[in-house]
C-alpha cells in the first residue's frame, strides 16, 4: 500500500509539474502577444506625413495646353500638339501618349522615348505655346469676385484692389488667404487689412503665390442687417 500511495503521489506531482509548465508556456505566449500588439497597432496606425511642394515647382501640363515639338535631325516630324481633355496627345507616326501632369523636362523625355522606337536617338526640344497662366482667386465681399491673372509680384491688398476693392459688407479685419501646400494640404491665414490701412504699414502685406485664393467675409452689420429696423442700421455702421 505504501508503494502504491508513493507511486500515486509521484504521478500527481508529475502531472502538476506538467500543468505548471503548460501554464507558464501559455503565459509566455500571452506576454509575447501583448508585446507584439503595440507594434502591430503602431504599424496599422496611419501617420500624417505630408509631402510639401518644391520651393520652385515646375509647371505641369494640363488639358488644353499646347506646345511645339522640334526635331533637330528629323524636321519632318516637327509639330504642334494640344493636350486633350483625357490628358493624351497624338503624335505623328507614333500615336497617343499620356502627358498630363508632366513637367517640360519629363515631357521631352517621354517624346524622345516614344520616337526612339522609330528614330535613332532623336534630338527633341519642346516649347510651351499656350498654357494656363499663373492666377489667383478673389471671393467673398469684393467688388468683382473671380479668377485673375497673376503677373509679377502682387500683394494681398493689391489683389483686393484688382478685384474691385471691399464692398460695404466686407469685414476688413479678417481677410482669409488660402494657399495649397501640397496635393493633400491647404494652409489658411487671417490678415487684418483694416489695421494695415489704419497704421499705414504694409510690412505684413503678403505676396500672393500662383493658385492662392483670398476670401473676404461679411461684417457683423451685414449679417444682422436683414433683422434690423431701417432706422437703426446707421447706428451700427462702424461695427466692423
Image: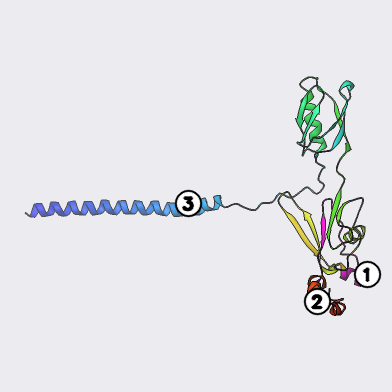
Specify the farthest residue to the front. Answer: 230
Number of other residues with Cα within 10 Å of mark 3, as a class: few under 14, some 14 to 19, many 20 or more: few
Say which quarter of the image contains residue 218: bottom right
Give the residue pinned by disc 3. Answer: 36
Give the residue pinned by disc 2. Answer: 228
Stretch of the chain drawn in magenta: 194-219
Number of other residues with Cα within 10 Å of mark 2, as a class: few under 14, some 14 to 19, many 20 or more: few
The residues bearing labels 1 and 3 have C-alpha atoms spaced at a distance of: 62 Å
Asked if residue 73 is positioned above or below residue 168 in the image, the reply reads above
Give the residue at x 13% y 54%: 6
**In the rendered image, which quarter contains the N terminus?**
bottom left
Image coords of residue 24 (percent x, y): 33, 54
User: Looking at the image, is mark 2 or mark 1 earlier in the sequence?
Assistant: 1
User: Which of these two is toward me, 54 or 83?
Assistant: 83
For discs 2 and 1, the disc positioned in front in the rendered view: 2
Label the magenta part by its dominant secondary structure: loop
User: Looking at the image, is mark 3 or mark 2 earlier in the sequence?
Assistant: 3
Judge whether residue 81 can be spotted in this image: yes
User: Which of these two is toward me, 155 or 224?
Assistant: 224
Give the residue at x 87% y 67%: 193
Give the residue pinned by disc 1. Answer: 200
Q: Which mark is residue 130?
A: none
Amino acid at each position: 500500500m505504501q508503494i502504491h500511495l508513493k507511486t500515486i503521489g509521484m504521478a500527481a506531482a508529475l502531472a502538476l509539474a506538467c500543468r505548471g509548465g503548460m501554464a507558464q508556456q501559455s503565459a509566455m505566449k500571452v506576454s509575447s502577444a501583448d508585446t507584439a500588439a503595440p507594434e502591430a497597432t503602431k504599424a496599422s496606425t496611419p501617420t500624417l506625413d505630408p509631402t510639401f511642394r518644391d520651393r520652385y515647382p515646375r509647371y505641369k501640363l494640363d488639358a488644353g495646353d499646347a506646345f511645339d515639338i522640334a526635331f533637330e535631325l528629323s524636321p519632318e516630324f516637327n509639330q504642334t500638339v494640344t493636350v486633350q481633355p483625357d490628358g493624351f496627345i497624338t503624335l505623328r507616326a507614333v500615336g497617343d501618349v499620356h502627358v498630363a501632369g508632366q513637367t517640360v523636362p519629363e515631357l521631352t523625355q517621354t517624346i524622345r522615348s516614344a520616337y526612339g522606337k522609330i528614330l535613332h536617338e532623336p534630338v527633341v526640344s519642346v516649347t510651351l505655346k499656350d498654357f494656363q497662366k499663373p492666377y489667383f482667386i478673389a471671393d467673398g465681399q469684393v467688388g468683382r469676385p473671380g479668377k485673375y491673372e497673376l503677373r509679377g509680384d502682387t500683394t494681398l491688398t493689391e489683389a483686393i484692389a484688382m478685384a474691385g476693392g471691399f464692398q460695404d459688407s466686407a469685414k476688413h479685419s479678417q481677410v482669409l488667404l488660402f494657399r495649397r501646400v501640397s496635393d493633400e494640404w491647404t494652409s489658411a491665414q487671417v490678415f487684418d487689412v483694416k489695421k494695415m490701412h489704419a497704421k499705414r504699414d504694409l510690412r505684413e502685406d503678403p505676396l500672393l503665390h500662383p493658385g492662392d485664393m483670398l476670401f473676404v467675409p461679411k461684417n457683423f452689420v451685414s449679417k444682422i442687417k436683414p433683422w434690423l429696423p431701417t432706422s437703426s442700421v446707421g447706428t451700427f455702421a462702424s461695427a466692423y
